[in-house]
Image (cartoon, rainbow, N blue to C red):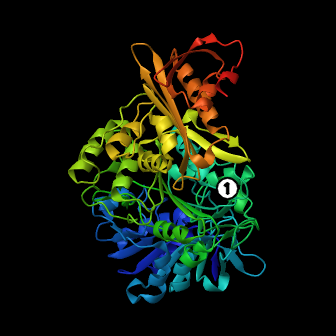
Amino acid sequence: MKLQQTEEKDLDILREILRDGIRIYIGSGCGEPQRLVRSLCTLLPEHRDIEIVQAISMGSLPKNWKPLEGHARLKTFFVGRNSRDAVNEGLADYIPIYSSSIPRLFKEDPLWKIDIALVQVSPPDEHGFCSMGISVGTDKSAVESASLVFAQINREMPRTLGDSFLHTSRIHYSFEYDEPLLEVVFRERNALAERIARYISPLIEDGSTLQTGIGRMPNWVLIYLEGKKDLGIHTEVLTDAHLHLIKSGAVTGLKKTTNQGKIVATHCMGSRELYDFVNNNPEVEIYPTEYVHDRKLIRQHYRMVAINSALEIDLSGQICADSMGHKVYSGIGGYVNFMQAASASKDGKTIIVMPSTTPDGLKSRIVSHLSNGAGVISPRSSVSYVATEFGVAYLHGKTIRERAMALINIAHPRFREQLMTEAKSIHYVYEDQITPPIYEPLYPGQWETWQVFPPNVNLFIRPVKPTDERMLQEFFYSLPFEDIYFRFLSAMKAFPHRNIQSMVNIDYEHMMSVIAVTGGIGAEKIAGIARYILDLKTNMAEIDVAVASEWQHKGIGTFLVHYVAEIAKSKGVSGLVAYVLAANRAMLAVFHCLGYAVHSKLEEGIYEVSLRFDEPALACRTEEYK
């Protein structure tokens, strides 16, 4: 290694080694050797047809490549804010490729021979090893494949552990120059991300190992998971959001199947605080892309959770994440590797998080068909969960019709009717499928709760959703004849789509239905249901309830009636009305324990029971119905 001590020498060295038509690899992301790049840019106009390769440009390379046309051209594996305009104007090139495949290009493809690698490293230790610090990813394989390596030694670069080291014997030229590293910081909290995080938090179990993609939304969501326990991190990019989660105590890595207790990434993109945290920290290990993105390694993790964003998703579940039509926006990166591997992991999950609309609110991100020119990064077969600020859609194992209904249900309300019309035109849903009326709140998540029933069984209580149609249909078909008769006051034998859809497509104002369910999202089963329908003339709500046979005599029906009564009262409803068979003594007793004076009259074996919320009862009376 030839060590240079004055900053003028870097220009001299670059001038000496640059040649027309060569390929130069530049260290990527926040690890970019900015001083070397600035010097390179001053020399490029003196040459022709130099090819510059970078995984993602964030620093000193120009945004406008027009003045360098014919002198140099950028090839990037991931389009960031600095290269986006140039790529879409045809002045730079985007290579759509898995990040895990890039090292093989450098090492095995003769057309990808790297002549010079410009990288940034930490000062060498007593054994002559420099650390590539916060940018190991594809930089390490590029260095190992390059004919010449020119390193900027920067004392601001942290010394990270793992497989990040580069011996001075592998560096042909070096140059000492200290300067602040590039930083990417999202400091403000985000209400939309907080809402999405609230929806996906129940999906992320304690002991899960997390991967998050590049972008604001996946990282913002991380911030709101600090209540979890023993989380692990095996991800492409380590950010300040991860640091927040680590400092909260949620991350221990003790449940990880591989690299137990270690935080594993390929590079870091964050604040100086993050860079100081990873410096010489044995808890953090930074590895090359080919290791971190290896699907066999990723799938070994128990409860591997891949959280990524999307630009568009169609009603069948196809995901576009790297372009807006023909306009390239980002890249493939580790998206596919982590999504497929997490799907194959034991109890693993894939979660797509995205706002329901574009930033200007003019276009839905959930569409009937992807934009012309949009690339499908993830096929419809790979996605399990999609979350917007309006809820979570579970797609795995669902039909196209069920997927379309689930996605329309979490689309922005302004676009739901249009999406339903388009879904009907392509025969994705029933021709008579109704669109739920839109009232505020759209989905009353405040009425979601957990309740323990004997013998220590925890059931999730929540308002019904349009996507519950099949589950509710199965619930009614499972009820014995007597329960159906009690519930409907008739011997109903069929529960077709045309009837059931009206029970789940509700406005949560004039009609409210609450269900008690077992299992998590995607594996739910209804144990009981209670609902009311408001009569606008009288402001009284008619209520009914049903509980599955195996869940009866545990207090579920009683709880649901009390809960629905509480909701009705909070919405200004005057009281409740119910029509109960005289033989249904248990349900009659429930109404007398709601705490209000009960009025009832018996006609032809059916009690009309009513109560008003402004008439409290003096005592709970049940004896007459036992």
- Dot 1: what SS? helix
Q: Which residue is mark 1?
A: 274
Residue 277 in view: yes
**Amino acid of disc 1:** Leu
Q: Position of residue 55 (x, y in %)?
A: 47, 69
For residue 43, above or below residue 501: below
Q: Position of residue 32 (x, y in %)?
A: 54, 65
Residue at the spot x=50%, y=31% of the render? 544
Instruction: Give the crowd class for mark 1: few <14, some 14-19, many >=20 residues within 10 Å.
Output: many
Residue at the spot x=33%, y=36% of the render? 414
Q: What quarter of the picture does the N terminus occupy?
A: bottom right
For residue 594, above or below residue 379: above
Residue 189 in view: no
Q: Residue furthest top?
A: 615
Left or right of 400, for residue 104: right
Q: Residue furthest left?
A: 425
Left or right of 114, for residue 84: left
Residue at the spot x=40%, y=49% of the render? 406
Q: Position of residue 435 (x, y in %)?
A: 32, 38
Q: Residue 480 or 155: which is nearer the viewer?
A: 480
For residue 466, above or below residue 442: below
Q: Residue furthest right?
A: 126
Residue 600: quarter of image: top right
Q: What quarter of the picture does the C terminus occupy?
A: top right
Q: Residue 532 or 179: which is nearer the viewer?
A: 532
Residue 280: quarter of image: bottom right
- Counting every numbered tag in the picture gives 1
Q: Residue 443 or 278: which is nearer the viewer?
A: 443
